[in-house]
Image (tube, helix red, strand yellow):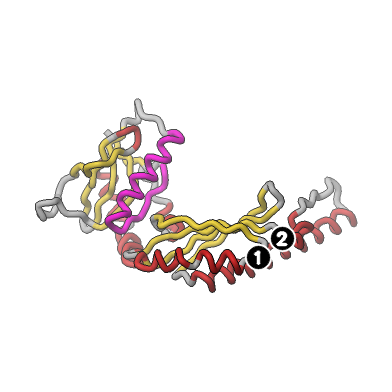
Amino acid sequence: MAWYAYCLTEHQTLPSGVRARRPFVLDGIQGVSGAPVMSYPSGEFAVIVSEYDRATAKLDEKSVLEHARVVSVSFRTCTVLPFRFGTIFDTEDAIRQAVRSNRRTFCESVARLRGKSEMRIKLVVRDGSLRAALEQIDLPDTVGREYLAKLREKASRDRERQTKARALSVQVHKLFNPLEEEVSCKKVNTGGMLLDIAHLIDTKSIEKYQNRYNTAAKQLKNCELAISGPWPPYHFLPEKLRTVAGNS
C-alpha cells in the first residue's frame, strides 16, 4: 500500500502525552478519496498521510480540494510545510528517507515559519493610462525594420507594465508591512492588470492586517482589491521542499 502525503509538521503527541512511534489516525478529517488521515512520525517531524491504492485510486479536481482541506485543518493547530499535490510514497521507508534527506531544510523552514501565516491580495488595475501598455503586440513573421520597430514597442510596453506593477507592489507593501512577500503580475481578459500578492505575516497580527483593508482600498486608486487568508505558507517554502514528490 502506498501513502499519499499532504504536509509535514512538527512531531505530534498522542492525547495521553506518550510520544507516538507508530502512525495514528487523526480524528474528524478525511483525505483523498475519503481515506482516513494519519500522522506518520519520523524523528522530530510527522508526515500527514493517508493510505493510497495506485491500482484503484484516481486523482482529480475533487482530490485537489481534499488535499487543500487536510493541509488547512493541520495548519489550524501546528506549523505545516505543504507537499506538492500528488505526492505519493510507495513505501514507509520512502517517507522516512524523504524526511532524512531533507531534514536540515525542514528544520530551517519550520523554525522560520513557526507562528506565521500567509495572506493573499488580488489587485486588479483598470487604469486608463495603462490601456496602450496592455494591448497585445504581435511580432511580424519576417525580420527587418518592421520587426525591430515592433520588438522595441513591445519591450517599451512591457517595461511600462512592470514599472506600474512595481510601484503598486511597493505601495501595498508599505500599507500592509509584511515580513516577506511574493508578487506575480499578468494581464486579464477584461482589459486590466492583475497583481497576485502573497504576504507572510505573524499569525498574531492577522486582525491588524485585515483592518488595513479599508485604508488600502481608499489609497489604491483605479484598483479592485480583495484579501483572503490566513492560509498555510504555500508561497514561502524553500525550492528544495517543492521538489519533494515521493515516488509519484
| Picture quadrant where residue 161 is located | bottom right
- Report the front residue among 142 and 194: 194
- Report the front residue among 208 and 161: 208
Q: Residue furthest right?
A: 145
- Disc 1 packing (10 Å; few <14; some 14–19; many ≥20): few
Residue at 22 percent across and 42 percent down: it is 27
Q: CA distance from mark 2 to mark 1?
A: 8 Å
Residue 64 is a magenta residue: yes
Residue 38 vs residue 59: left or right? left
Q: Which of the labelled discs sits on residue 127, or is there none? A: 2
Rendering coords of residue 182 (x, y %): 52, 62
Q: Point out the stretch of residues depicted in magenta.
A: 60-85
Rendering coords of residue 203 (x, y %): 36, 64
Viewer-nearest of discs 2 and 1 = 1
Residue at 41 percent across and 40 percent down: it is 65
Residue 52 vs residue 243: left or right? left
- Report the front residue among 54 and 137: 137
> Is the C-beta separation of discs 2 and 1 under 8 Å?
yes
| Picture quadrant where residue 105 is located | bottom left
- Report the front residue among 110 and 181: 181
* Residue under pointer 1: 221
Q: Tell me the kind of residue under disc 1.
A: Lys
Rendering coords of residue 193 (x, y %): 66, 56
| Picture quadrant where residue 144 is located | bottom right
Residue at 39 percent across and 45 percent down: it is 68
Q: Tell me the kind of residue under disc 2.
A: Asp
Residue 11 is a magenta residue: no
